Image (cartoon, grey):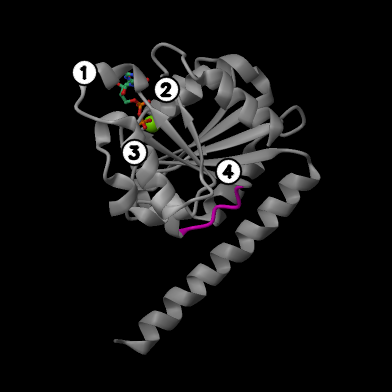
Amino acid sequence: MDKKEVKVMQKILNMNDKIAEELREELSKKNILFINLMSSPGSGKTTIMERTAHEFGTKMCVIEGDIQTTLDAERVAKAGIQTYQINTGPFGGDCHLESGWIKSAMEEIEMADLEIIFVENIGNLVCPAEFDVGAHVNAVVLSVTEGEDKPLKYPLAFQNSQLCIISKTDLLPYLDIDINVIKENIKKVNPKMEVIELSAKSGEGFQSWFDFLKRS
Ligand SMILES: Nc1nc2c(ncn2[C@@H]2O[C@H](COP(=O)(O)OP(=O)(O)O)[C@@H](O)[C@H]2O)c(=O)[nH]1
Ligand SMILES: [Mg+2]
C-alpha cells in the first residue's frame, strides 16, 4: 500500500472531524438541533422533509446535498422554509458531504429563529456514513422496498446512526417483506438503534418522528 496516500487521506479525515466537532459545539451553544439524514436514493428523505416542514415551519431549515440539480431544495422550499442546495457535481461529483461544505452553507443561513437544521445527505448508503458532518443525530432512512438484508450489507450507516426511520410502510401490504426481520437486522448491527416506522404518503408514524425531534 502507498504510505503517502494513506497519510493524505488520514489528514483529510482529521480536518473533516475537527470542523465537524466545532460545528456541533457552535450549534449546541445556539440551542439548534442538527440532524443528518442518510439513505440510498429514493428512500423518501425529501418527502419526509416536506412533511416535517409543515409541522415545524420556519423553525427548521434543510441543507440539501445532491450531485446535480436543485430539485430537492425547490421541493422543500415550497413549504416556505429556508433551504440551501449543495451540488458536488462541479467539484468531482463526490458521493457524500463533508463538514467544510456544511460549514460554508451554514454561514449563509439566517439562524436567529431556527431550532432544527437538517442535512439531506447525498443518496448513497455507503460513503456518507464515513464522514462526520457535525450533526447531533445521524439518522438513516430505510424504505421497506429496499429489502430486509440492507442493514447487514451496509452496516456502517446503521452503526454510525442513532435513529433508523423505516419509511414507506404504506407499501408493506404489496411486498413480500417482513418488517420484523428488518428490525431484527437493524438490531444485529446496532442493538442501541432507535427505530421509527412511518409513511410519508399516509402520515402514519409521523407523530413519533415529531416527538423524537422535540425531545432530542
Ligand atoms: N408509497 C410511498 N411512496 C413514497 C413515500 N415517501 C416517498 N415516496 C415516493 O418515493 C419516491 C422518492 O422519494 P424522495 O422523497 O424523493 O426520496 P429521496 O431520494 O430519499 O429524497 C417519490 O416518488 C416519492 O413520492 C411513502 O411513504 N410511501
Ligand atoms: Mg431527496
The three-letter code of the residue at mark 2 reads: Thr
Question: Is 188 placed left or right of 23 in the picture?
Answer: left
Q: Nearer the viewer, residue 6 or 183?
A: 183
In magenta segment, residue 132: yes
- For the residue marked with disc 4, what is the amino acid? Ala
Placement of the N terminus among the 4 image quadrants: bottom left
User: How far across and down, in percent of the image, does residue 73 sit?
Assistant: 46, 28
Q: Identify the magenta region.
A: 131-135
- Image: 202 above or below 185: above
Q: Is residue 70 visible?
A: no
CA–CA distance in space, label 2 to label 4 = 22 Å
Q: Earlier in the sequence, mark 4 or mark 1?
A: 4
* Disc 2 to disc 4: CB gap under 8 Å: no
In the picture of the structure, the residue carrying the numbered disc 4 is 105
Question: Is tag 4's residue or tag 3's residue first in the polypeptide sequence?
Answer: 4
Query: In which of the image's four quarters is ligand 2 placed?
Result: top left
Q: From the viewer's perspective, is 77 left or right of 182? A: right
Q: Earlier in the sequence, mark 2 or mark 3?
A: 2
What amino acid is at disc 3? Ile
Give the residue at x 43% y 47%. 187
State how far apart marks 4 and 1 are (Cα).
40 Å
Disc 2 and disc 3: Cα gap in Å? 21 Å
Residue underneath mark 3: 182
Label 4 or label 1, whichever lies nearer to me, is: 1
Q: Which residue is mark 2?
A: 47
- Regarding mark 2 in the picture, which secondary structure is present there? helix
Residue to which mark 1 is pinned: 174
In this view, 24 is above or below 205: below
* Percent of width and height locating residue 118: 56, 36
